[in-house]
Amino acid sequence: MARTLQRSLLVLSGGHPYEAEPFDELIHSLGDWNVTHLVHPRAEEAVADGAADHADALLFYDMGGYSFADGGVTSCRPSEGFRSAIRRRFAAGKGAVAMHHALAGWADWPEWAEMLGGRFLYQAGRWKGQDVSDSGYRHDVEYDAEVIASHPVTDGLPSTFPLRDELYLCQIDESAVHPLIRASHKFTSDNFYSAALAVSGQMYSNAGWNHSEGSNLVAWWRKAGDAPLVYLQFGDGPQTYADPNVRRLIGNALTFTTGA
């Protein structure tokens, strides 16, 4: 009998702090994958050299392109090699899953936000041709995740399940995505804290900050080029990593994006 080859999973992280050991346990719990985990800046270099071309599945848990220092933030674009490799993968119909803070990555590469269908901003910026404020965050929110679509990504999940995780008040283009899960939380500026104030040293503050009411969508998928791209806002820390529904969701998403 022919031996079945193990599927390959490439995981990218770095650019945002996380707890390494619990995350490593998570990515090795998602199914029968041969896992390669790369951290920036090595991750960017390896993708530019072709690492993403051959992986069956690709998971973004990174937030590339930022430098935080002296109460401010600077950003930069990924290399042309990295950008070309991501475009090449999606043009070939090979998908990806992006988690949590990946929505904030590569602020100076607008195409990344267009691919994802959303954008978290650490500074006031532009979205869909309009000036918008910096985005909001709130840790340890207790909420119910409400599955709103029957889809391979949500297969086997209960209709609602409780979570305690970080949520974002940010830019999401619902017209450009296929919604999967919503959060039972009020997405208004009085319920979140300003990312720009946090960077300046004022953690957990929304003083003088105003953000338009946001979407409660926390999971969706869309086509990036010819490939399926799934975004899951879950994943701030070990409690969420260990949640069985979150693990099922990530595993389903990875399989869906391989076309299996």
Image: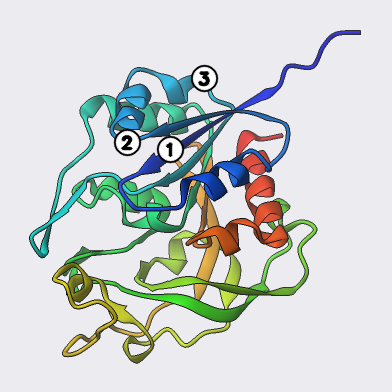
| Residue 129 visible in image | no
Of mark 3 and mark 2, the one earlier in the sequence is 2
Name the residue at 78% across, 69% down: 158
Q: Nearer the viewer, residue 101 or 149?
A: 101
Q: Amino acid at mark 2?
A: His
* Disc 1 target residue: 12
Mark 1 or mark 3: name the one nearer the start of the chain.
Answer: 1
Give the residue at x 54% y 54%: 221
Question: Residue 175 is drawn in which quadrant?
Answer: bottom left
Residue 187 relative to residue 244: left or right: left
Residue type at mark 3 is His
Say which label, 1 or 2, has the lower sequence index: 1
Task: Residue 23: give x, y in percent of width and height.
Answer: 53, 47
Image disc number at residue 54: 3
* 104 with respect to 77 (left or right): right
Q: Amino acid at mark 1?
A: Leu
Q: CA distance from mark 3 to mark 2?
A: 19 Å
Q: Which mark is residue 125?
A: none
> Which residue is outermost to the top?
1
Separation (CA) of disc 1 from disc 2: 7 Å
Of all residues, the one furthest to the front in this rendering is: 21
Q: CA distance from mark 1 to mark 3?
A: 14 Å
Evaluate if marks 1 and 2 touch, with contact meaning CB atoms under 8 Å apart. yes
Q: Please tell me which residue lies in front, 51 or 155.
A: 51
Q: Which residue is under mark 2? A: 40
- In this rendering, the answer to whether 250 lies above or below 133 is above
Task: Name, please, the residue furthest toward the left.
Answer: 70
